[in-house]
Amino acid sequence: MILLRSHIGLALRTSRIQQGRTLRDVAKSARVSLGYLSEVERGQKEASSELLNSICSALDISLGEVLVNVSAQIKTHETPTLIVVDDAA
Amino acid sequence: MILLRSHIGLALRTSRIQQGRTLRDVAKSARVSLGYLSEVERGQKEASSELLNSICSALDISLGEVLVNVSAQIKTHETPTLIVVDDAA
């Protein structure tokens, strides 16, 4: 099952890792607990819209850009696999 | 402040209205309460990822497509307004 929170969490985690930052650093900057950020990143907790903004701000990334990536990921997962059967063989 | 839940709610509401369907009909199909769906549409409640999937399914729309529209809307709101000052005037 495609879960929005999983894709958002992965996108946030990817940004943080790319910046070489720790959970502790980003959590402090976003004013959320380390445990909360960790759960959001792992797709185990739905981030409220307000805290999602705080986390994006702490990472200096735009929510719009995060969602562009997330929507592309989700669309990829939604696309049914095309199986080509070659009747002529 | 840009809130993800407001933009998602508006996108869901727009799809429902375009289909000429009632809150009651979509709520029943998505197996959520009418009050819950109404609050989600008005951006007053965060939809869980699971119930967001149910609502998209009830509306026969793809979550990926909803998020493409939502991300475009949010990016529009994030773009700073450009004010042109004509010094030559």
Image (tube, coloured by chain):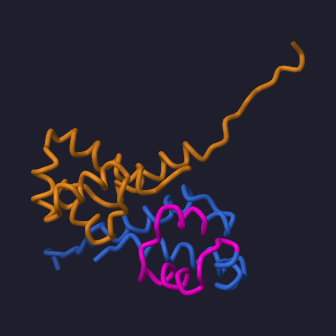
Chain colours: A orange, B blue
Which of the 4 quarters of the picture holds residue B21? bottom right
Q: Is residue B10 above or below residue A58?
A: below
Q: Is residue A29 left or right of residue B70?
A: left
Q: Is residue A41 above or below residue A17?
A: below
The number of numbered badges drawn on the structure is 0
| Quadrant location of the C terminus of chain B in the rendered image | bottom left
* Residue A19 position in % (x across, y down): 17, 41
Q: Nearer the viewer, residue B53 or B62?
A: B53
Q: Range of the magenta residues?
A: B29-55
| Quadrant location of the N terminus of chain B in the rendered image | bottom left
Give me the residue at 31% from left, 55% from top: A40
Q: Is residue B38 left or right of residue B88?
A: right
Q: Is residue A87 left or right of residue B35?
A: right
* Residue B44 position in % (x across, y down): 41, 83
Give me the residue at 35% from left, 46% from top: A10
Q: Residue furthest right?
A: A88
Which of the 4 quarters of the picture holds residue B22? bottom right
Give me the residue at 23% from left, 56% from top: A37
Q: Residue furthest top?
A: A89
Magenta stretch contains residue A53: no
Give me the residue at 25% from left, 51% from top: A38
* Residue A56 position in % (x across, y down): 24, 59
Magenta stretch contains residue B50: yes
Which of the 4 quarters of the picture holds residue A58? bottom left
Q: Main secondary structure of the magenta part?
A: helix
Q: Nearer the viewer, residue B82 or B39?
A: B39
